[in-house]
Amino acid sequence: MTMDAETLRELKLAVRRFTREQLVPLEAQVAETDQIPSSVVQAFKDMGLFGLSIPEAYGGLGLGVSEEIEIVQELTWASAAFRSVIGINLGVGSQGLIMDGTADQKAQWLPKLAAGAIASFALTEPGSGSDSAALRTSAVRDGDHYVISGSKRFITNAPHADLITVMARTHPERLPGNAHVTAFLVPAQTPGVTVGARDRKMGQRGAHSADVHLEAVRVPASAVLGGVEGRGFVTAMKVLDRGRLHISAVCIGQARRILYEALSYALQREQFGKPIAEFQLIQAMLADSQAEIFAAECMVRETARRFDAGERVSLEASCCKMLSAEMVGRVADRAVQIHGGAGYMQDTAVERFYRDVRLFRIYEGTTQIQQLVIAREMLRAAS
């Protein structure tokens, strides 16, 4: 623990109150307008949420994963779009710098990120997704600079980013260990960087993503994350375990809220002269959802504890992400079923959550990628 138990409890309660009293009432507005109010972003800054995982030396709260997941689960009682504002800052946007950044890079960027500068991470391209090492964006050395050219797709927070971590090829061939990939710290206002129109997504309105185009973008050699070419992919892999635990916590927070909505509806909705919560088939759906949420909670807390203890948890983190993402989808499906026809109407929260949570089975590595990671780790351990 990097924060004493009482302070963590107070922070958790503060986030819980803020989420339920301030964010939940705004959900319908955000879904309608596709915009998170600036007052919410400012409140996140005031509460220190942008810097949850950034060391105190750089202005953050320096939480370990075990602490971070508790705060994230409270925050995601509300629409996941709110969490998306700070999500990259907590994960790859800061952790790559913390793990592999030079002293100058940390001093330049981490205090800004902790204070609320918005980070973005540009890896996915029109022609590369799960096979991220196949990216085509190039970075060519030109004296003391690099010239970056290419396009990125589905980049979270791109429309609002202050700093974009861009993954690019510094070698035309695919090298062993993916040493052809280098990470660059690119200020979003750098000439040649343009952001496309906001993506129109199935759900999570208010959480914005877009294409990022880089046309002969010149950055100094000091923009290479860590100061050494060819380590971009390694850095990205380092932060994946923490990122997957973070997304697992998001799934748990969403599932808790969805189950609350389903249970509340079952208690007040009457059929055949009594609340539908008294019908055993409804009870079975509620019970299955509660059991699956509890299983995910236990898995994620234990894996986070082991991560904070310095253990290697790649297999376990993938198990957590796969199970949690699939779990929240099932919970949302049952909630719609419990609501019946009302669950198909946009007036109900469960209809929105049903669409929102579908994304969790795709990003931070699809369910199928998690299966491959888990199997690979099993085979490695057995050989």
Image: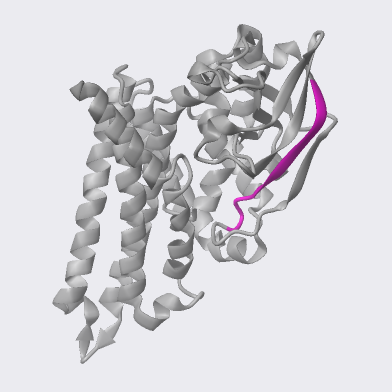
Q: In front here: 13 or 150?
A: 150
Q: Establish if 262 lies above or below 211.
A: below
Q: Establish if 334 lies above or below 224.
A: below
Q: In front here: 360 or 279?
A: 360
Identify the residue shown where x is 66% and y is 63%. Answer: 33
Determine the image quadrant of residue 126: top right
Q: In front here: 52 or 356?
A: 356
| The C terminus, quarter of image | top left
Identify the residue shown where x is 41% and y is 53%. Answer: 77
Q: Residue 142, percent across and down?
A: 81, 13
- Per the rendered image, the range of residues in magenta is 205-218
Would residue 78 be found to the left or right of residue 374 on screen? right
Q: Residue 150, percent across and down?
A: 73, 34
Determine the image quadrant of residue 134: top right
| The N terminus, quarter of image | top left
Q: In front here: 51 or 178?
A: 178
Would residue 237 be found to the left or right of residue 106 on screen? left
Q: Residue 148, percent across and down?
A: 76, 26
Q: Main secondary structure of the magenta part?
A: strand
Taking the view exactly as shown, the residue that stands out farthest to the right is 191
Whether residue 261 is visible to the viewer of this picture, yes or no, is no
